[in-house]
Amino acid sequence: MPEAGAATEPAGRESFGSRLGRAMADRGPLCVGIDPHPSLLQRWGLADDAAGLERFSLTVLEAVGSLAAAVKPQVALYERHGSAGIAVLERTLAAAADASVLSIADAKRGDIGSTMAAYADAWLRDGSALAADSVTLSPYLGFESLRPALDLAAQSGRGVFVLALTSNPEGASVQHAGGADSVARRVVQAAAVENRRYFGGPGVAEAAPGPHGSAGHGSVEHGTVEHGTVELGSVGLVVGATVGSALSDLGLDLAAVRGPILAPGLGAQGATAADLRRTFGSAYGQVLGTSSRDILGAGPRIQALHDAARRTLDELRAA
Amino acid sequence: MPEAGAATEPAGRESFGSRLGRAMADRGPLCVGIDPHPSLLQRWGLADDAAGLERFSLTVLEAVGSLAAAVKPQVALYERHGSAGIAVLERTLAAAADASVLSIADAKRGDIGSTMAAYADAWLRDGSALAADSVTLSPYLGFESLRPALDLAAQSGRGVFVLALTSNPEGASVQHAGGADSVARRVVQAAAVENRRYFGGPGVAEAAPGPHGSAGHGSVEHGTVEHGTVELGSVGLVVGATVGSALSDLGLDLAAVRGPILAPGLGAQGATAADLRRTFGSAYGQVLGTSSRDILGAGPRIQALHDAARRTLDELRAA
């Protein structure tokens, strides 16, 4: 007889939300971007080729793999090198798994129907060469068009981060459209519905932590903002660290999403940990602060990279 | 001394819009999708692996490479197989170039800043392993976030197709948002501005065809709908073949875009050539009708594929 919860979680793997929540509680809420930009490769004395990418990626993993809750390889920077770059990404994702650090493939994929299913297959299926713990998705074709990835993630104990609200000035032309019923708000609400479904539907207070996700006791305290006290769903959002007042201007209730918030923009892009705290307010406990160039610029020495990540993490924990 | 137009077009390569416009005039307005779906591979008696993908892709190219104006490999279906699949895609794109048929990498990529530049590098740069004649892009982060790809495409004689309006029911939640100033409308207007820039800015009637894009004589007749009579810009849009009345409901002026319209949805997805003509009206001359499964389902025999493509093409020309 199958165990409770077996329909949505494979034997041996907890939900992504549970795994990420525990990593954030144990290690702190830091995600380190693995961004082998041509300029960083040069600064590290590496060639802008597959061998340089691999050296870069494995160095970052060695430096921060035991410190960060997650690492986020930027897929575009591997794709630049075609199949040879994608092969390095495969090895990087495998190395992250070996190092027991969660991976977020920053791919921003999005399509419909069987094509979306193929992207889900690529990034979220057991046995796929590119399988990651989670992948970022883009909802221009509608949040619901991402269904094949949402479903496969739930089945395979993996997660997704859906683009919601970004801080680049051009983003508002799409994300703010619709006024009180903005595009960003619709995405946030859809993610909330999705996680609520996982937690047992409206009216069920909360799922218990642990591998089988059975409905449990207790209640989500939206006012609680310490990392590790909020049980997370597996459908996350990408919300820029420097979105400022747009969250409240657009009436986005991120706490109600009950999923992780990937917040790129720490450091080089201008946000401090204190800014994150201020911007995300009662949802700060869900926020996974993401830093790339600020930390990566400290390389290529392992110790220097580790120290830079440690400083960022300390700031995030202190905020 | 550099020739006129050298700043935006590399020696020896016309703009993508000119090349595509000529192919549509010479061959007719058909794009054949190269979609190695697992179900099609099985139907063709091929394994769902890299070898199967390659056999499938090269068979389609052999069957339609001299008939279609363009072929459109669906990147997700190669990505499913990781780096081995991407290597097949590289060979497929190279084979399309050898066969002198234009390629549209259906990747729907989108990001910001230097990450977007990396995607542009992957798909639109001379010498990149994945270089295609054009790539599809997704504008959730704002049309203007695609700037690195728009600029590199213009410099390298390549093109882009930006997602604007799709016919999947979930798409409206994003694309229709904003009422009279909808997201889809903003994308359409931005593409129009982009092509106008290429043609010489507002007030300049039309660029002459040919490799150097110098401003020429004549005027665009928006009422003219025969393929081959409209000079095309290199910034195209993706608009579903089955969007029905949404084009007029949202007030989208596709004729003013003066770029190619990639219209997936012919055949298996429900649109006939006559539907396309009705839906796109005065912009029909810009429309590149795209069929995938309807044609691919006729395989694996080369002659049967060729005949199926020929039938679709005849319908498009007759419409």
Image (tube, coloured by chain):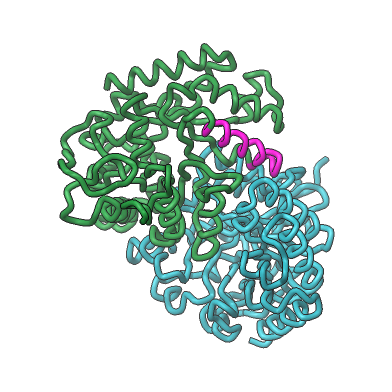
Chain colours: A cyan, B green
**Residue at x-position 42% and y-position 24%:** B267
Q: x%, y% of residue B222?
A: 18, 39
Q: Relative to residue A188, is residue A182 drawn left or right?
A: left
**Looking at the image, residue B85 lies above or below residue A189:** above
Give the residue drawn at x 49%, y 34%. Answer: B72
Judge by depth and name the residue closer to the eye, A115 or B18: B18
User: How far across and down, in percent of the image, does residue B75 sit?
Assistant: 57, 40
| Segment tinted magenta in the rendering | B79-97
Disc count in the image? 0
> Can residue A209 be spotted in the picture?
no
- Is A67 on the left-hand or right-hand side of B182? right
Q: Is residue A300 visible?
A: yes
What type of secondary structure mainly makes up the magenta span?
helix
Q: Is residue A309 magenta?
A: no
The residue positioned 24% from the left and 46% from the top of the image is B207
Note whether A200 is above or below B136 in the view shown: below
Q: Quadrant of the C terminus of chain A?
A: bottom right
Instruction: Report the residue at 68% width, 52% height from top.
Output: A85
- Residue A155 placement (x, y as % from top left): 69, 46
Q: Quadrant of residue A54?
A: bottom right
Residue B229 image offset from top left, x and y in percent: 23, 32
Q: Nearer the viewer, residue B16 or B79?
A: B16
Placement of A41 over or under B2, stated as above or below: below
Q: Nearer the viewer, residue B1 or B45?
A: B1
Q: Quadrant of residue A280?
A: bottom right
The single residue placed furthest to the front in the displayed view is: B1
Examine the structure image and report whether residue B95 is included in the region drawn in magenta: yes
Indicate the quadrant containing the N terminus of chain A: top left, top right, bottom left or bottom right: top right
